[in-house]
Amino acid sequence: MLTQYKLNNAKTILNKSDSPDEDLFIGTINPYTGCEHGCVYCYVQAQKYQPYKNTADLFKTIGIKQNAPALLEEQFLKGLPYGMLCIGSSSDPYQPAEKEHKITAKLLEVTAKYGFPVHIFTKSCLIERDLDILKSIAAKSIAVVSFSVITLNKTTAELFEKDAPPPQRRLETIAQLSKVGVIAGASIMPVLPYITDSLKQTEALIKAVKENGGKYVWPGCLTLRDLQKQKYHGALLKNYPGLASRYEQLYHNRHSPSQEYNSSINDMVYTLAKRNGLNMGLSFMKKLPRWGKGLKPLQKEFNF
């Protein structure tokens, strides 16, 4: 099935952040509905988040919110409280559709115009195209990019995120972002139990992030809900059949692994991050002013 692009006009573009930390972002923006990367573990496959009735459409029918830049400008003109915007919370803002339609690039231009800080989630190297815009935002306020890298193992990456760039290529993009003043880091989300969670793998990944100019790592454990769980378990049975029973024990009819497991992952990443001179998560963003004229003092405080 070929990917279908559907142009549409969104009613709104800035969504209230559902982050557990309400001070993290003032709102989230998704320029596209659906995502062409088609990652096996994608949490948006779950019915709770699914934008389409047919789950298969999530990866093959891409809604393009062509009026998104205009809607964002309207928000600024109305008097948006100063704070960080998050672009790409449920679909990659630099997926292949962006190459032609440039909705994300236009959103960044609007953001730069008003001097607001921005955070971007992506696993696409297409973001390199917009280095100049991001450099401009970083000069006026602050630009942060959380690059999704869950493993350095190419084979594992191809199994779970076959349509995304190879891990090493993503690390190279982190280096490019860092060179122009963007605060870049790795989003180690999701950590795949018994596949990408070993001390050896995690330490190698964190060292690679550091070597490529990254400033932080941000871990998050795999969730498994209804249709998403079915898709993931299908891949698990095909490629790691011996792990199925261990997953049942670890999740035990929950959508997330045990609290003990979550804590062990966070503790491991924190220790390794500290050892390598990286920040753990985005806690520094909690100090962002909701109103203000730039964030240079923040950059000095964290030696960015």
Image (cartoon, rainbow, N blue to C red):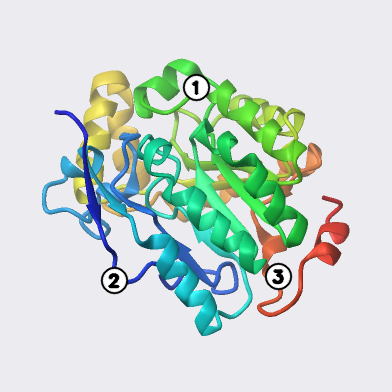
Task: Name the amino acid, label 1.
Answer: Pro
- Mark 2, secondary structure of its residue: loop
Q: Position of residue 29 (x, y in %)?
A: 44, 61
Count of picture labels: 3
The Cα–Cα distance between marks 3 and 1, rounded to whole angstroms, is 33 Å
Q: Closer to the N terminus: mark 3 or mark 2?
A: 2
Using the image as rendered, state which of residue 238 and residue 295 is in the foreground. Answer: 295
Asked if the residues shown at circle 3 and circle 2 are in contact, with their CB atoms under 8 angstroms apart, the answer is no
Q: Closer to the N terminus: mark 1 or mark 2?
A: 2
From this view, report whether residue 113 is shown above or below residue 152. below
Residue furthest bottom in the image: 78
Mark 1 vs mark 2: give the one in front: 2
Using the image as rendered, state which of residue 90 and residue 244 is in the foreground. Answer: 90
Q: Position of residue 152 (x, y in %)?
A: 56, 23
Task: Name the amino acid, label 2.
Answer: Lys
Q: Is residue 182 left or right of residue 28?
A: right
Residue furthest left in the image: 54
Which residue, given by chain and number where applicable, does mark 3 sit on? 288
- Mark 1, secondary structure of its residue: loop
Which residue, given by chain and number where applicable, does mark 1 sit on? 166
- Mark 3, secondary structure of its residue: loop
Q: Is residue 147 left or right of residue 56?
A: right
From this view, report whether residue 243 is shown above or below residue 107. above
Q: Residue at x 68, y 50 (%)?
A: 280
The Cα–Cα distance between marks 3 and 2, rounded to whole angstroms, is 28 Å
The Cα–Cα distance between marks 1 and 2, rounded to whole angstroms, is 36 Å
Task: Judge the density around disc 3: few (<14), some (14-19), many (≥20) Cα neighbours within 10 Å.
Answer: some
Q: Position of residue 115 (x, y in %)?
A: 67, 66
Q: Closer to the N terminus: mark 3 or mark 1?
A: 1
